Image: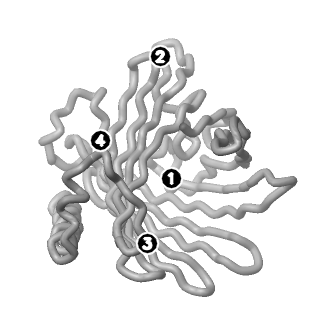
């Protein structure tokens, strides 16, 4: 049921794009891959890029270590097609991956996002399809109960605009969870600026028991606590290189991580 719903959403998104393209005569723009334009009259936007990280940490858990537990840098490409249906709302179809330099780990995800903005807060709903090619489970395997190739996650994020820029995130798997396991994850944090350096503090907890979040107790555990800083280094008058640093503490596993990131 979860996979069918996810792909129905994707088909709905694609049908809207096709209908709008036909109505506005945009076929010629989409046929030319070398002529992507940012037109104020077009409701579409395309964004793509990549991050290079010193190690891959997701919700306080490290992925892609070798047999001895040694870390590896990861290359993480991403791409997003966004359709803005109003000044305060949009829907996006995105793709994201992570590939370890040591060859021990690969991840290839896709997601669908609905975003709305108000004067007080921004809120979004995201459905993510997690797929791990390195497990050698065929992409077409849609089994559930932890045996399939795809795990579907539903996430709701609320972000305040005024006063303190605080966000709250709720996430839970809705398809292919291991039976008798939990996957509920809660996170909150806020951001601020220090000497033109964007800074953020975050606290995340997961419900156990959970193979998904590596929680072996029957209660909520703090697994993703830390801070991050981001800035841009000027390379030329027209180009700056975004870099970031993140410190993460998994209280449940009693582990800390320091991650350096370069955005290409």
* Residue, disc 4: 131
Structural crowding at the residue carrying mark 4, measured as other residues with C-alpha within 10 Å and reported as few (<14), some (14–19) or many (≥20): many
Based on the displayed image, in which of its 4 quarters is residue 140 positioned?
top left
Along the viewing direction, whichever of 131 and 199 lies nearer the viewer: 199
Residue where numbered disc 1 is placed: 218
Instruction: Tell me the tag on residue 183.
Output: none
**Nearer the N terminus, badge 2 or badge 3?**
3
Q: Is residue 156 above or below residue 212?
A: below
Kindly identify which numbered label has been placed on residue 66: 2
Q: Give how far apart the Cα atoms at labels 1 and 3 are.
A: 52 Å
x and y percentages locating residue 9 in the rendered image: 22, 67
**Quarter of the figure that contains the C terminus:** top right
The residue that label 3 is drawn on is: 40
Chain-order first, disc 1 or disc 2: 2
Residue found at x 59% / y 52%: 221
Q: Position of residue 20 (x, y in %)?
A: 21, 74
On screen, 178 above or below 264? below
Q: Name the residue rendered at 57%, 29% in the picture.
A: 55
Labels 1, 4: front one: 4
């Amino acid at each position: 049921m979860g996979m069918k719903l996810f792909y129905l959403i994707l088909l709905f998104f694609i049908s809207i794009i096709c209908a709008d393209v036909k109505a506005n005569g945009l076929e010629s723009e989409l046929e030319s891959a070398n002529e992507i334009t940012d037109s104020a009259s077009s409701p579409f936007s395309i964004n793509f890029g990549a991050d290079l990280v010193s190690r891959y940490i997701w919700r306080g858990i490290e992925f892609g270590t070798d047999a001895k537990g040694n870390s590896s840098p990861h290359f993480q490409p991403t791409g997003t097609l966004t359709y803005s249906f109003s000044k305060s709302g949009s829907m996006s179809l995105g793709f994201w991956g992570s590939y370890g330099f040591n060859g021990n780990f690969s991840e290839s995800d896709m997601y669908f996002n609905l975003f709305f903005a108000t004067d007080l807060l921004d809120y979004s709903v995201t459905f993510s399809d997690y797929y791990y090619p390195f497990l050698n489970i065929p992409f077409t395997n849609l089994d559930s109960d932890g045996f399939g190739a795809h795990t579907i996650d539903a996430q709701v994020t609320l972000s305040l605009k005024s006063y303190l820029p605080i966000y709250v995130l709720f996430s839970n798997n809705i398809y292919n969870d291991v039976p008798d396991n939990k996957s509920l994850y809660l996170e909150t944090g806020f951001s601020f600026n220090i000497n033109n350096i964007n800074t953020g503090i975050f606290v995340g907890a997961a419900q156990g028991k959970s193979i998904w979040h590596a929680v072996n107790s029957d209660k909520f555990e703090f697994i993703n606590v830390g801070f991050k800083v981001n800035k841009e280094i000027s390379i030329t008058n027209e180009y700056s290189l975004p870099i970031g640093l993140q410190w993460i503490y998994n209280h449940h596993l009693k582990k800390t991580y320091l991650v350096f990131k370069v955005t290409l």
